[in-house]
Image (cartoon, rainbow, N blue to C red):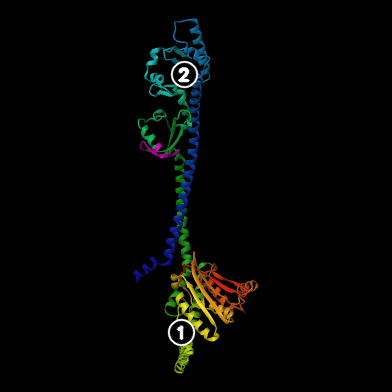
Amino acid sequence: MKKKSHFFILHSIQTKILVITLSLTIGTTLASLLISYYTEINTIKKTTESYMTQYIAFADERFNDMLSEVRKTALSVATEREIIYPGILHGKESASYEEYQRKKRIASYLSGLMSQKQYMDNVLVITKDGRIFQADTQLVLKRDLETPVMQEALQTSRAGIVYDRQAGEVFYSCPILNGGDIVAVNLISLDYGVLTAAYEQEPLEGVDIYVFDSGKGLFYTNAEQTGREGELWEKIEKSGAADGYVEYNGRRWYALSWQHGTEKMTTVGLIPIDVLLRDANALRRKLLLVGACAVFLAVGASVYLSGRLCTNLKLLTENMEEIRTGNLMVRSQIHSPDEVGKLSETFNEMMERIRVLLEEVRQKERLKREAEQSVLATQIEPHFLYNSIDSIQHVAHMRGEREIERVAEALSELLRSVLTDRNEFITLWEEREYIENYIYIERFKYRGDFRLLWEVDEELWAYRLPKLLLQPVVENALIHGISTKESGGVIQVKIYREDAFVIVKVMDNGKGMSQEKVEQVLADIKRKDITGFRRVGLANVLNRIRLVYGEEYGGTVYSCQDMFTCVELKLPAQAEL
């Protein structure tokens, strides 16, 4: 008994409500805290990213502006025709006053280009025959031109930066052409420290900056660990994005990259993740404290609410136990404005409804037995009708009335097909048999000379349609169309497939109708007050088509006074029956 009591407590609604409430409350609280935490983290990260991005972009813009000015200076020297070209094209000669004046003019011109540009150390023009023109007063000798970086700058055939990062030497080299041949080289000596000082700002401390040249070589970096710049370049190039997260040197970084428009150099800034999340760590501790308080309050509230809620639930459970024993008259006495009170009211309404339904079931069982007896009685009537028609057919046969015998046979077949076939849909071939039997009977009635012609696509004989759909249309064509003709009456049934439809046309060469009469007939059918000429059967057919197949299907009437009438029906080619 004690074991059963423990089992009941563990599986009671109160325990389940307590567990569910705690789970939902704690889960919602934790989810809210996590969402808040990660939202704030993302906000802090985005703010830091934006802040750092602006500073790096500003530094990169300053660096690029200096390179742009250097390039403009080099182009100015390479295109100067009045001062530079006379000096470099005059040819090498012994010292003279004219040579001294030319060098002085060139030096003065080059010095003017360097004015107010601290990042330029010197501007030189070095001819192919070894003459040196320079802006700086410090003399540059031929042996100074033999360093590897200087030789590379002199031998270049295109304008661009040539540098030795280890030695701190940077030159901008631009060939000077005359008639398509290189006659001299303009070298602008740059101050590496001034150029790269653009990236040495206080806000960028802790951010690793890498500047790569167009050949993927490292032009500048402030990182302490070097030697794996190629790996960094591959990661940036592989990502194909301007910014994103990368793994490099065993750490996770937020990477930003720009490409210079002037020299096609690429700047990469790496921001450590711990820099981005510095403020987020303090936020994490605060959220954990808030989460712990919220969970504590949730536990207390869940215990209190589950206890209050289950008091009435236990009473309702006792009422249900009485019902299980067979007492259907029990009713709940719980009156509460909360959901349990509504559940109690619903329980009472349900029990009352069950009582009413049981009474209805007893009444229906009684009516069912009475209906079965009525059906057994009515089954006699069709047999009596068939037996009567068979008797007429037998007497006609005995007396030699072959026509009456055939009519009675057709009528019997028609009645048996209509009354005994329970299928709502039949094939077009079966519909044709109904109509043929009907026409045979009508020939005996009217004694008229008329014909029924069928023009049907062969594959459509198996098409299924509602039973007796065409018979009323053929009946209208006979009674209201050709019944008054003494001879030559024709009813033609034409059925064919057209796109997604099966078209049925029933035409007669009878008295026809005027256009006004046709419009009146169609209007009366739409109003469904179907009385008078040709309206009962046709309205029934069109309404059945719309009910079975939908409003897009149906039919219409064409007619001409004293000439013909045509009823056209439109059915689906692929009917789902």
Lower sequence index among marks 1 and 2: 2
- Residue at the front extreme, as displayed: 487
**The image quarter in which residue 421 lies:** bottom left
- The magenta stretch is 236-250
- In this rendering, is residue 233 above or below 318? above
Residue 61 position, x and y percent, is 50, 30
Q: How crowded is mark 1: few (under 14 residues within 10 Å), some or many (20 or more)?
A: some
- Quadrant assignment, res 527: bottom right
Q: Which residue is drawn at 46% across and 94% down?
A: 399
Between 93 and 491, the residue placed more toward the observer is 491
**Residue placed under numbered mark 1 in the picture:** 413
Q: Is residue 341 above or below residue 213?
A: below
Q: Is residue 473 left or right of residue 140?
A: right
Regarding residue 334, the answer to whether it shows in the image is no
Question: Magenta span has 246?
Answer: yes
What residue type is disc 1 on?
Glu
Alpha carbon of mark 1 to alpha carbon of mark 2: how far?
114 Å
Return the residue nearer the eye: 448 or 366: 448
| Closest to the observer, 83 or 170 | 83
Marker disc for residue 179: 2
In the rendered structure, which amino acid carries the disc numbered 2?
Gly
Q: Residue at 46% across / 32% down in the picture?
A: 259
Q: Is residue 446 above or below residue 92?
A: below
Q: What element carries label 2?
A: loop
Q: Where is residue 333 in the image (x, y as percent from the top left)?
A: 51, 74
The question of residue 225 being in magenta is answered with no
Secondary structure beneath dot 1 equals: helix
Residue farthest to the right, as pictured: 516
How far across and how far down the image is residue 135, in percent?
48, 14
